[in-house]
Image (spheres, grey):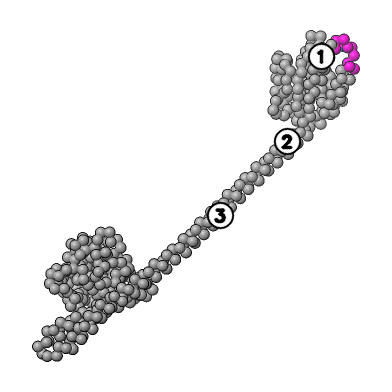
Amino acid sequence: MHGWFLWGLIHFFEIMRVFAKNNNIFRVLSEAVSEGLLVVNSNSLIVATNRKANRMFGYRREELIGKSLNILIPDSYAKKHHEYVEDYFGTHKTRKMAMGRYLFGKRKSKEEFPAEVGLYPFTIYDATYVLALIFDKTEIRKKDIQIQELNEHLEKKIKSRTLELRETVAMLKKEMKRREEAENKIKRALLKERELNELKTKFLSLVSHEFKTPLSGILTSATLVSKYKGAEHQEKRDKHLKTIIGEVGHLNGILTDLLSIERLEKGKEVYKFSEFSLSKVVNEVVYNINMLLKSGQHINYPQNIDDVVIYQDEKIVSLILTNLLFNSVKYSPEDTEIDILIDIETNKMVLHIKDQGIGIPKRDQKHIFERYFRAENALLSQGTGIGLNIIKGHVDNLGGEVYFKSKLNKGSAFTVELPIGNGIDPRIFDVRV
């Protein structure tokens, strides 16, 4: 900004030997400069100042002339500054000091202030001098500090707003996830309701069919029995009476299963444990199932249970055995055998029912314990698809296991493991589950 003037001033000093005895000319010219001027010789002694420099540092002119430049340098910089001065007089180049950062001067009051210094060397009468042009940067530095503080404030505000934005985004994501979960829950509920309606429809159809067929058989047999009145017709009467008994037993089994489903669903099933003869239960079940056997079918009775007494729910053991045997009879052809095998282990009874029936297709096996499910090769046979589901529900409640192996057209083998005696979980003893 003042370069043109400074260069003129330097040229002026080059001809100052004309005015060597009169420094008023320097004083007149230097006072026209709005910045502080100092002239320093090679010994770092101040040889000239202007009024601006005097005011800047808080000295009178006579207090500065002939003094070391160090009185204007902060103590913390004085040692280094002496090295800089020696180095500078060695290079003898025009330049600004500390480009890109602040220097500091020291006032008479010891107060330090930021400054910018331009150095301009010149020679008079073979003596080297340096003209220092000094700018007081106090106000500018205050503004720089204000700008820096403002920038820091803005950075903090940006960080704060960014954090708030992140938190808002996180909350929105959480809310979106919550709403999505709620929507999915509603969809699942609607789907479940639709499935339940479909199951109800299917159930009513199955039950209607299951009741209609045996009732028709009972009605037909009862009608025919009434026609066979003579003693010679006793065999025919017995045949139809057996049919009636069998169909009534079948209907009773369906009703028992339906009641079990209701109790299992509502958690109202009450298990009542007692000691009972295992052979007695097996005999009763086999006797009832024998009335449903097809021509040539035979049930092989277990031989090792005559004196076995177990502690379990007698009604549930009978229900499990009845359902498994009924399925084996229904899905096995004529002239085949059905095996009942029972192993009594420590605190556990293992029941095996094996047949030579139609088996279960491999792709249907994973669904076999689902309610109302029927394998594709059993759709033309009577059945509700609830028997195995009921067995699974009771066995699970009693702390047991049920599983099977099956091959298409080769037969099936179902196994039920039930705790007996002290093996029964006390949490389900005589309580609702």
| Residue linked to disc 2 | 144
Q: Judge by depth and name the residue closer to the eye, 38 or 2.
A: 2
Q: Where is residue 229 in the image (x, y as percent from the top left)?
A: 14, 90
Q: Quadrant of the N terminus?
A: top right
The x and y percentages for residue 201 are 36, 72
Question: Is residue 20 found inside the magenta-colored segment of the image?
Answer: yes
Q: For the residues carrying marks 2 and 1, which lies nearer the camera in this image? A: 1
Whole-angstrom CA distance, mark 2 to mark 1, is: 36 Å
Badge 3 vs badge 1, beta-carbon distance below 8 Å: no
Residue of label 1: 11
- Identify which residue, 320 or 139, lies in the foreground: 320
Q: Which secondary structure, mark 3?
A: helix
Amino acid type, callout 2: Asp
Examine the residues drawn in magenta and state their main secondary structure. helix
Expressed as whole percent of the image width and height from the top left, the position of residue 270 reads 34, 76
| Front: mark 3 or 1 | 3
Which of the two labelled residues, at mark 3 and mark 2, occupies the earlier sequence position? 2
Q: Residues within 10 Å of mark 2 (few under 14, many from 20)?
A: few
User: Looking at the rendering, which quadrant does residue 275 occupy?
Assistant: bottom left
Residue linked to disc 3 = 172
Q: What residue type is labelled 1?
A: His
Seen in the image, is 98 located left or right of residue 242?
A: right
Would residue 67 be visible to someone looking at this image?
no
Span highlighted in magenta in the image? 16-25
